Amino acid sequence: MAQLGGGPRLVLLFSGKRKSGKDFVTEALQSRLGADICAILRLSSPLKEQYAQLVSDTRRMSDIQWFREVYGPVTQTVRVVASEQSRQQRGWVFTSGVDDAESECGLDDFGDFDWVVENHGDGQHLEEQLENLVEFVHSRL
């Protein structure tokens, strides 16, 4: 069901540390919803009219504020979290000047995420969380 005119019906802003699995989670969610239902966008890309938009790289409070101002109540925040051990298994190594920069830490104290997705390596638990998100997206479209 395409929205006639205007913007998207739902915008999910994903954030998380390097190697937490933000891209993996957004791609898994899109594969379950279908490309005809949603699009994965990067903040550096222009937003296009879609049913739902998954912004996979929200990094700063100003990012969230902008989307809330522009898209209002259709905006939802999703934090992807993974243990340091899981991130290390994915190749993460702490890099000074990167992992302690605002682009990595700017949302650490946000604390008001609409959704938190735990991506510690338990595929079944991740699948359950994704299914909850899929159901929510469908309820909004």
Image (tube, helix red, strand yellow):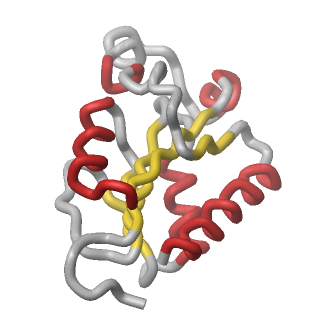
In the picture as drawn, the residue positioned furthest to the top comes out as 96
Q: Quadrant of residue 32?
A: bottom right
Total tally of numbered discs in the picture: 0
- Residue for point 28% across, 58% down: 71
Q: Is residue 117 left or right of residue 37?
A: right
In the depicted structure, whether residue 138 falls above or below residue 111: below
> Quadrant where the N terminus lies?
bottom left
Position of residue 119 measured from the top left corner of the image (x, y, whole percent): 67, 41
Q: Is residue 33 left or right of residue 127?
A: left
| Vertical placement of residue 141 versus 121, above or below | below
Residue 8 position within the rendered picture, expressed as x and y whole percent measured from the top left: 32, 70
Q: Residue at x 60, y 34 (%)?
A: 81
111 or 129: nearer the eye? 111
Q: Quadrant of residue 134?
A: bottom right
Q: Position of residue 101 (x, y in %)?
A: 33, 16
Residue at point 45%, 79% (across, down): 37
Does 35 appear above or below 43?
Answer: below
> Which residue lies at the image location 42% right of the left edge and 26% below the top edge?
107
Q: Nearer the viewer, residue 116 or 32?
A: 116
State the residue lying farthest toward the front.
Answer: 73
Q: Position of residue 6 (x, y in %)?
A: 21, 76
Nearest the eye: 96 or 47? 47
